[in-house]
Amino acid sequence: VEPPLWKTCWAYGLYLAALMGSVFSYTRYRLRAEERKLRKIAEYNRILEENVQARTLELQKANEKLKYLSQHDSLTGLYNRRGFHGAQERFSNPEYAPVSIIVCDLNGLKLVNDMLGHQYGDALIAAAGKVVESAFRTNDMVARIGGDEFAVLLPSCGEGTLARACARLREAIDKYNQENGQFYLSMSIGTAVSSNESVNMKDLFIAADDAMYQEKFVCK
């Protein structure tokens, strides 16, 4: 008696082939699902990395802006007193000797503020800052260190270079007064220069400041 068809070797072979086909199809389905999952994870990581990089760049720019604002005067764009002190520490290194300091005081600011208002006084301060900055080298450090007071640090600057710098400053002030009739710009200027061997910034600034006040007293 022949066995039923479903019990024949052919039937078992077909069953086995079908089973293997099902296992293969399921395995292929799972592999494709895993590939899709991995692609999604990779895309998520890419987007996350881009966001982290963008955020890091934003933080770097924000920190740079904060650092700039902490060292610069908002009215003139020059270094402020904090930035000036930082430059003093840097230029106190003997490698920058001789170092010169110029201290400038804006004459008549109180009168402008009292008679015309602080907005005109601010305009005069801003104009003075541009005039002072225009007279110096790119490696010189120009700062507004007080309401009406400016200071300049000149590294590797001896007596001759300092004299030429002061002459350029006075010429810049004269040129401004010739070209601008709204405000008359007047500044008292004091200078000091260190020795070639060492730089004592505190004493150097005091000497320049004293010289500035002597000129202011003479002008009065």
Image (cartoon, rainbow, N blue to C red):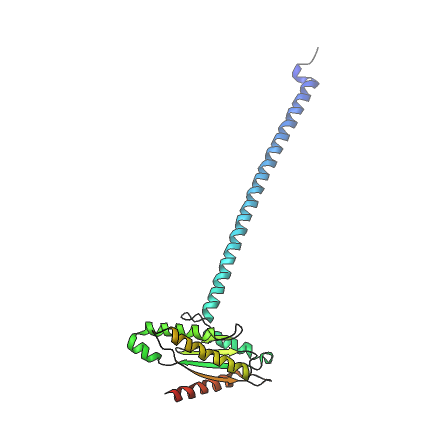
Decide if residue 89 is on the left or right side of residue 21: left
Q: Nearer the viewer, residue 97 or 165?
A: 165
Instruction: In the displayed orientation, state which residue is furthest to the front.
Output: 178
Could one spot residue 100 in this view of the protein? no
**Outermost residue toward the left?**
115
Residue 159 coordinates in the image, percent (x, y): 54, 84
Residue 125 versus residue 40 in the image, above or below: below
Q: Nearer the viewer, residue 2 or 191?
A: 191
Residue 130 point in image, percent of width and height: 43, 72
Can you name the residue that lies furthest to the top here?
A: 1
Mark yes or no: residue 65 visible.
yes
Instruction: Name the residue located 32 percent from the left edge and 76 percent from the top edge.
Output: 113
Q: Quadrant of the C terminus?
A: bottom left
Residue 6 appears at what percent x and percent y? 65, 17
Quadrant showing the N terminus: top right
- 91 lies left or right of 3: left
Residue at 53%, 55% in the rendered image: 53
> Could you tell me residue 162's position as x and y percent?
52, 82
Is 198 situated above or below 20?
below
Query: Exactly how many numbered labels are in the figure?
Result: 0
Q: Nearer the viewer, residue 161 or 43?
A: 161
Residue at horizontal 47%, vertical 64%?
65
